[in-house]
Amino acid sequence: MKQIASKQGRSHLKKRLRQSGMLVVVVLLLTSGLGYRFYHQPKLDVDTVAPQTIVAPASASVEDVETTEKKRLEARSGVFPAVRVDPAANQQIQQLLQQHLEWGNSIREALGAFPFVKTSVLSTPTQIYLRQAPEAEWRMLQQGVRSSTASPATRSRFSPDQQQADDQLQAYRKATSPPALSQLLETIAVARRRYPVALATLAAQPSGGALLYSTSFLNLADADWQATQSELKSTLDRLLTQGIYPGLSETQLNQAISLQVSASMPVAAQPLAVQLLSTILSPNLIKDSEQTKLMAEQAAQAIEPTLISIQKGKIIIRAGELITQADFVLLDHFNLSQRSIDWLGLLSFSGLVAVAIRVFKLIDRRTKPKLRQRDYVLILLLSLSASVVVAVSKTFTGLPAIGLLLGSFYGSAIGGTVMGLLTFLLPIGTEVSWRYLLPSAAGGLLGSLMAGQWRVFKRESPRTREDLASLGVLMGLVQGVTYLMINTAIVSLWYTALSGAALSALSGIIWSIVAIGISPYLERLFDLVTPIRLAELANPNRPLLKRLAQEAPGTFQHTQFVSTLAEAAARSLGGNVELVRAGTLHHDIGKLHDPLAFIENQMGSVNKHNAIDDPWKSAEIIKNHVREGLVMARQYRLPSAIQAFIPEHQGTILIAYFYHQAQQHIPFGKVIQEADFRYDGPIPQSRETGIVMLADACEAALRSLGEATPAEALVMVNKILKARWQDHQLVDSGLTRQELSQISHIFVQVWQQFHHQRIAYPKIITLVAAKLSLIALDLVEARESSGSGSTSVFWQMRLYPAKK
């Protein structure tokens, strides 16, 4: 016991040492790959103190690139946005003015002509008074005019307007004939009748118009109204041509309107004109992004490069002084900045890398993706590729491609974690700018989340390359929008960042194309199974599956039904449905080596095992389909995850038929070894292969059921599943007893869908169908005998059962 414990201790110690060594290697690789900026750090950097006085070894004029770019960035952001007149806004404002003028004309039409008589006869104030005077006052005036003059007592009760009207009417009576006076009084009466109608029309103005046309509008002379309409249109055209800026205050707008109106409008109509224009006017200038970008770029290009000049022998920096940007440019130009490896920074960065690896391992353990050593190598290589891209381009990171690949290979949790850690480490260890890093990180994070099965998005992972291409377009859009948001915050004018945003979006799409292009090669090189590759492997038109359908049709039909059962169970238990489908379709490919050795392919022909008459040889033939299947899987380069279904769906179960046959016909002196009649294994190592084992065991039994009830079918399925459980075939699969009960109910439900009742056709129809089937079969046989074509026996049996 002590020796065993000692061996176990040494084995555990070796394992821990090996893991620690690998961790150190990974930390060193990531630190050296992601932290290359620490290899060439200047000791005499900006804002450090010069240890000694440094003199220029030669004359030079050096451009300060950083200062130049900073000034150009300020120039771009300082450009005032260019604007242009919006024709649609102008048209809308002009239409609004026309509507108001038309309504004013309708009010004037109801009012009638004004003044309604010459002002030499009756003054304008008198006409205004007579048109709206109370009926009693109007009657008193009429009586006074008709009786030549009003009595002093009556005139004493007149208001000033009434006295003025009486005086003018009396003067007209004296100066003209009685018919002319009567005509004047009738004209006044007509004006009085039209005035209430005009008031009613005025009150019925459209919503918002009541403030434009008040009763004072009715006192405006016709000539003034005509002139006002003409001047309003001209004034509006001038204001729109000058442009109305968004954000212009109401006070400033009214001042501009008043200035224009006072120069050309009749005095009496000016208040109405100001009110009308201030009501309908709105900003008609919109920002011109193209012109703004052009102006911003012109302003940036107008900035001359900042040059730092010095003569040979002149002092660059004195001892004890703080190094400025200009000083650093000269020091770096003359290789006097003392660049070397920053060991302290590199050590600190390695600590951050170690923390990042720890975070990754925690996520790895929580999600349990069962990563292999080759998977860790691929994740490491993809992570290091980001720093290589940054070192080469300075602006691109490759994160969109990395995120898309990791998400589709290992799921959203692993892909999202790596994206987050790289986003944290890259700006520390490399010289990439946040302006370029964050947009690509956003695209990569989106790709990693949506390429895997991320429940937040309530969608399945992409199943075709076209799906990934569509996701790549979405990643590009997100990357472009993120770039625009970040650079707008820096530059303050989003127009100037549009070209950069478009380039960023295009780069995101290009990186997704790169990821899609190299994905198949990485899948083969690192033996990966993605939903897309699994969908491709499950295509029945692939050569191997076509061979199975043609050479072993019974096995192919068996595989289809097993796949239906297993997929339903995997979907219910939350397993990998794509893996189950592809694995099930290939689990019996070894039967292609000898199809007639299996009863489903014999189709009524002689059973070869009867001729063999040796249960040991027959059992070996049956077991051989697993070995041959693995050979064929390697020949067709199937992933190891698919190959696992070939041996594991049989596990180490007993080939019961030939075992019992051997017990009944045991030769004299020969001992029966149960191992001779058991498959070599291994037993299922995953839930998916365990489900396929159970589906494969139940398929033949469910097909053999005739008119059994669902309850009877469930009893039979439970017995089969219980036998597999008691035979210890599922101990390593991760399936539980509770899940077995769930699986049995699912199998019965699928069986019910296949075993539904059919309508019983009348006898005469059945006879006619049988006759037609016989005729068709004769035609097929005649066709085959003539050599003009071939039809498989399997399809003859399916299409023409009447012959049978």
Image (cartoon, rainbow, N blue to C red):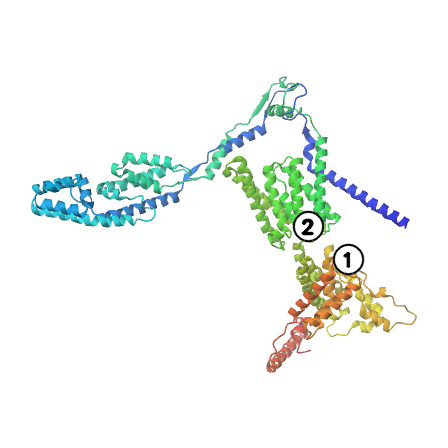
Q: Residues within 10 Å of mark 2 (few under 14, many from 20)?
A: many
Q: Position of residue 493 (x, y in %)?
A: 50, 37
Picture layout, residue 599 above or below residue 433: below
- Residue 371 seen by the camera: yes
Task: Find numbered disc 1 in the image and state the secondary structure of the residue it sits on.
Answer: loop
Q: Quadrant of the C terminus?
A: bottom right
Question: Which is more toward the observer, 537 or 656?
Answer: 656
Please tell me which residue is depicted at 64% across the width and 34% down the height of the picture.
431
Cα–Cα span, label 2 and label 1 = 22 Å
Identified at 27% across, 46% down, the residue is 104
Which quarter of the figure has residue 213? top left
Q: Residue furthest bottom?
A: 764
Horizontal arrangement in the rendering, residue 581 relative to residue 307 (left or right): right
Above or below, comparing residue 532 to residue 288 in the picture: below
Q: Which residue is mark 2?
A: 410
Element marked by disc 2: helix
> For the point 82% across and 73% down, which residue is it?
611
Read off the residue under disc 1.
732
Q: Amino acid at mark 2?
A: Tyr
Which residue type does callout 1 highlight?
Asp
| Residue closest to the eye, 681 or 535 | 681
Q: Quadrant of residue 802?
A: bottom right
- Indicate which disc, 2 or 1, sits on the residue closer to the N terminus: 2
Residue 184 in sight from this viewpoint = no
Query: Residue 669's x, y, as percent?
Result: 92, 70
Q: Residue furthest right?
A: 669
Q: Residues within 10 Å of mark 1 (few under 14, many from 20)?
A: some
